[in-house]
Image (cartoon, rainbow, N blue to C red):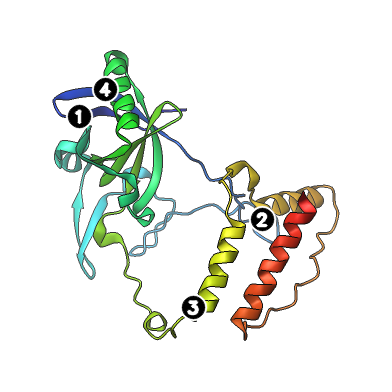
Amino acid sequence: MQAIWRGAISFGVIIIPVRLYGATEEKSLRFNMLHASDGGRVRFNRTCAECGKDNLTKDDLVRAFEYEKGSYVTFDETELDAVQVPTSNTVEILQFVPGEQIDPIYYNRSYYLAPEGLGTKAYGLLRDALVESGKVAVAKVAIRDKERLATLRVRENAIVLETMYWPDEIREAAFPELSASPDVNPRELQMAQTLIDTLTEDFDPSQHSDSYREALLAAVEQKVQGREVVAPAASPEQAPVADLMEALERSLEEVRERRSKAQ
């Protein structure tokens, strides 16, 4: 893996040199666009909306911020480099909190932090202290021209940095249907809880896979072999549930039957 950021963790007066690596990767299939008449690859074409010039190179471009409709201020790389904050090269730990206090909606992306050089011992100290405390560190760090809120936690002997959204980046769930929902029947609630209890088990990520990606790869293989991709029969549309108790009872029965067959 290639490091995407180098800096240090600031833990009180302790400075821990680290490298940052992406901890995740999306494995979706990426399609290219072809010209239908001749099969030519259609590529992204940088075209100026003002003069119509196309195939613009990096040297033709400049970064700009639209401060009002149609009006821009431009920045060159030197000016952007001059905009520095303390977290530009530092993961600044602000506090430690119980992890369950952080709503998962705030989490954005995960990265591995690896120690550099003489920072190995201090890195191990922070890692072990996080494990012993059972808490996560809340920090700030600037990555790729954006300062982010973040947490530090431990996974498989490595410190994981998870970037977070700022509070003003979380949209409010303002849906009129939520305030207009009817009261829940206690018997239905009890049955729903029974269904949840019946379906409760330890989480094992290896039991889950991307069915759509697998089906898409199978379709690609069929096309490569010159076979026609045949769509499966459409599933019948399910009507909205009219009787919640009946639906809950049927769901519970199906789960129990499936469990008994699996044993």
State the image quarter where residue 161 is shown: top left
State the image quarter where residue 206 is shown: top right
The disc, 1 or 4, on the residue closer to the chain's N-terminal end is 1
Q: According to the image, label 3 marks what residue?
A: 186
The disc, 2 or 1, on the residue closer to the chain's N-terminal end is 1
Q: Marks 2 and 1: CB-CB under 8 Å?
A: no
Between tags 3 and 4, which lies in front? 3
Between tags 2 and 1, which lies in front? 1
Q: Is residue 250 visible?
A: yes
Find residue 259 and report its horizontal and vertical position in percent. 73, 55
The disc, 3 or 1, on the residue closer to the chain's N-terminal end is 1
> Could you give the CA–CA distance between mark 3 and mark 2, rounded to whole angstroms?
38 Å
Res 212 label: 2
Q: Is residue 146 visible?
A: no
Between tags 3 and 1, which lies in front? 3
> Could you give the CA–CA distance between mark 1 and mark 4, rounded to whole angstroms?
11 Å
Q: Amino acid at mark 4?
A: Pro
